[in-house]
Amino acid sequence: MGFLVDSQNDGGPGFWGGCVRTLIRRKQVDSADGNVHGHGGHHQLAKELSVLHLIAIGVGSTIGAGVYILVGTVAREHSGPALALSFLFAGFAAALSAFCYAELASRCPSAGSAYHYSYICVGEGVAWLVGWALILEYTIGGSAVARGISPNLALLFGGEGSLPFFLARQAIPGLGIVVDPCAAILVFVVTGLLCVGIKESTMVQSIVTIVNVCAMIFVIIAGTYLGFKTGWPGYELPTGYFPFGVDGMLAGSATVFFAYIGFDSVASTAEEVKNPQRDLPMGIGFALSICCSLYMLVSIVVVGLVPYYAMDPDTPISSAFAAHGMQWAAYIITAGAVMALCSTLMGSILPQPRILMAMARDGLLPSFFSDVNKKSQVPVKSTVVTGLCAATLAFCMDVDQLAGMVSVGTLLAFTMVAISVLILRYVPPDEVPVPSSLQDTIDSVSLHYNRISEGSSKKKSKAHAGTSKDSKQPLLVGKNASADYPDLVKEDPSVKYVLNEEKRRKIAGWTIAFTCIGAFTLTYAASSLAIQWLVRYCLCGFGGALLLTGLVVLTCIEQDEARHNFGHSGGFTCPFVPLLPIFCILINIYLLVNLGGATWARVSVWLAIGVVVYLFYGRKHSSLMDAVYVPVAHAGEIYGRRSSGDTLA
């Protein structure tokens, strides 16, 4: 058969048609051939990471000092003694996203994480928004973590105001600004460490993470001893195990869900992993399992030592030990909190340079960000820019009010990763971009297959044979065969299969789109109590019907056979598709909807800036600007002919 050749550049049907086509153009999974159109000419990142390194990155990025405070707030306001169940359900929800990340990370092991997956499966426009949101997430997240280190560090030296003058926070008279030199210095130290090399920085993060984990193990062991000694007074309450009901426990799960954010940092290092198909899924899975286990064990112990209503919301663990005469334990716990913050700071700064590098490789950002240092084999320039921005924010701005914006980037990434898994399984890209410089090779291969197709058609029916009047214009046969050669549909079973497959892909694509619409409608209506009750119930019913219909349809139709050849083979396969990704989409959209209007107002400003940058720079400099799209089956042959310098007769 012949094959379809399509160019998705701005020469489409009119200005607006060209704009739409640029938003949905997709890039190819990085491979041996992908360097031609992807990041050819750039020095590659060092492949130094193993499973243990990935576990250290995942645990270090996930377990922050928040857990030392979060247990008190959530137990007092939502969960009560059932705090461990809140962590369990939140861990289950995070595991849904982890399964999706594991499959895509092993299939597409390249820098960029969710941005990279969205670009391959969804399109350039969505990928840009995801990448732009992740830049905001990691910058503000790193700054917020750095601002939280100095108060905890001061506790180790005797309390507030005990730090040296050049490290202590200082208020600038007349401006109402509190500067934090300690936060800025720590960001610069971490930035310098990350510039040395991925293996060296990961080794330091591993040591810091081990100290943090040891502090949590101390809490578990010492707290268990005190609990059995005192009879676990926190569980001997007349209100029972669920003082706020099951709804309160689930509300606590929604709050502590953000304590699991961090395993996506593992996916961002995919290009630096020695054996990504095996190590990435294991690293993500083990890191999440360790974090969930530690969270649950700490919460079981702490809520058993002190009744939930008597817990200190600021220092719940330290005060629980102090209530039993172990004031000295506060130093160990505070040291653990400081180590947790330092490890999380490294985990926050580590992914952003790689996302900047991936976007620059694709032409969406200046090539300055894609440079990789030949000696350290890390994107030093991107890392330095990231460190300067994070240090500036940490030094002069209280970013607590902006902390909610961190969640938008994470949840948006989680949602797009789940959608990408559905696309990979049901409608994987059937065309890949090839540089326009290979047009002669493309025409030669296309002509060769058209001649084969013509010869096959002549044997079956001379009346329906077709020839090309212009040898440089390939025949458009295959997916559009029914329009050009209607009688062949009756005679050629392969053409009939192509038509049936095209119909299945259209049904699957529209079903995925309507499923996402249904998830948004359902969660928005369920969360908006201000909407009139009749309208609210109708919207919930409509959204639920779309969601359920999408689940049934995707369960009934077959998955695309091309999914087996998508990207790198032999990696992790996400189970329970389509149920698991759809459930993941529903949970993440629900959390996005409930972030609050103020958070969305701030994020909208940042996203609007991103749209302007894309329209005036990224769209015009994209590496896919002049790409020619060819069927996946023939891409390898085109690159092979280019490499050997041969042409097909």
Image (spheres, grey):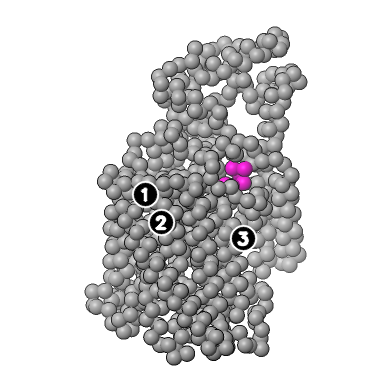
Question: Magenta part of the protein: which range?
Answer: 420-425
Is residue 21 placed above or below 51 in the rendered structure? Answer: above
- Spot occupied by residue 628 in the image (x, y as percentages of width and height): 49, 28
Q: Which residue is mark 2?
A: 53
**Distance CA(mark 3)–CA(mark 2):** 30 Å
Circle nearer the viewer, 3 or 2? 2
- Spot occupied by residue 546 in the image (x, y as percentages of width and height): 72, 52
Callout 3, which amino acid?
Ile
- Spot occupied by residue 435 in the image (x, y as percentages of width and height): 44, 29
Task: Using residue 620 as the reference point, say whether residue 503 is left or right of it.
Answer: right
Task: Using residue 225 as the reference point, say whether residue 376 is left or right of it.
Answer: left
Helix or strand or loop: what does disc 3 sit on?
Answer: helix
Helix or strand or loop: what does disc 1 sit on?
Answer: loop
Callout 2, which amino acid?
His
Mostly what secondary structure, the magenta segment? Answer: helix
Q: Which residue occupies the extreme top position in the image?
A: 462
**Distance CA(mark 1)–CA(mark 3):** 35 Å
Q: Which residue is mark 1?
A: 48
Q: Which residue is mark 3?
A: 587
Local packing at callout 3 (Cα closer than 10 Å; few below 14, some 14-19, many 20+) is many
Decide which of tag 1 and tag 2 comes sooner along the chain: 1
